[in-house]
């Protein structure tokens, strides 16, 4: 059981590192102007293109996946808006304290020693807060159906 939980935490933490890339890819997918005519052939009017309806449907439909660049490769992120929701919910949950600062530093690849000095905390407190935030993110990911505990 411990191994499974650890791998889920690593999987979720990976998305935190990729947050900005996922956010950008979702924005690009939502703002892609590739909406064209969706009608049928030239013989009928039953399939008349409705650009306004197409835009509205595109705005409310969840994006199934996005592709982001990771090093010299690409990775497909399924349900990217749910991942953004999990990450943002975690940041919002801790917005009243230093945990959010710790998370932002960690996922911008700042060395933990520098974060500890800047936030005036010990290494053990750094890791205690990180573990708590990871657990919260895991709970959020479970709630929106991104991961399963068993």
Image (spheres, rainbow, N blue to C red):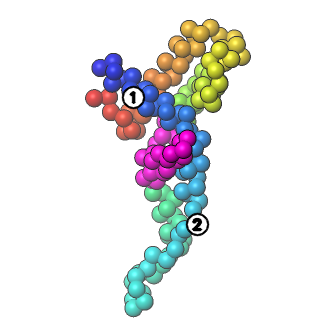
Q: Which residues are magenta?
A: 62-86
Neighbour class for label 1 at 10 Å: few (<14), some, many (≥20)? Answer: some
* Residue for point 59% across, 48% down: 24
In what quadrant of the picture does the N terminus appear? top left
Residue of label 2: 33
- For label 1, the SS is helix
* Quadrant (top left/top right/bottom left/bottom right) for the C terminus: top left
Note whether residue 105 is visible.
Answer: yes
Residue 73: x %, y % from top left: 50, 45
Q: Residue 112 at what x, y percent from top left?
A: 62, 18
Q: Is residue 72 above or below residue 134?
A: below
**Residue closer to the observer: 70 or 56:** 70
Look at 55% across and 27% down and name the residue there: 93
Extreme left residue here?
150
Q: Residue at x 46, y 42 (%)?
A: 82
Rate crowding at label 2 as few (under 14), some (14 to 19) or many (20 or more) other CA atoms within 10 Å.
few
Q: Is residue 119 visible?
A: no
> Above or below — where is 8 with respect to 131?
below
- Image coordinates for residue 99, horizontal then vertical, percent: 60, 21
| Residue 8 numbered tag | 1
Of marks 2 and 1, which one's residue comes earlier in the chain? 1
Disc 2 and disc 1: Cα gap in Å?
36 Å
The secondary element bearing badge 2 is classed as loop
Foreground of the two, 1 or 52: 1
Whether residue 29 is situated above or below residue 137 in the rendered picture? below
């Amino acid at each position: 059981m411990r191994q499974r939980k650890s791998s889920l935490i690593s999987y979720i933490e990976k998305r935190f590192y990729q947050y900005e890339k996922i956010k950008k890819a979702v924005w690009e997918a939502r703002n892609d102007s590739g909406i064209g005519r969706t009608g049928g052939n030239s013989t009928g009017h039953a399939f008349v293109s409705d650009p306004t309806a197409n835009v509205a449907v595109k705005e409310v439909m969840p994006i199934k996946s996005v592709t982001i660049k990771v090093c010299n490769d690409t990775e497909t992120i399924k349900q990217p808006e749910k991942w953004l929701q999990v990450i943002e919910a975690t940041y919002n949950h801790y917005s009243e304290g230093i945990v959010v600062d710790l998370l932002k530093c960690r996922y911008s690849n700042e060395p933990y020693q520098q974060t500890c000095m800047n936030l005036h905390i010990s290494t053990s407190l750094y890791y205690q807060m990180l573990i708590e935030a990871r657990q919260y993110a895991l709970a959020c990911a479970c709630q929106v159906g991104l991961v399963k505990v068993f």
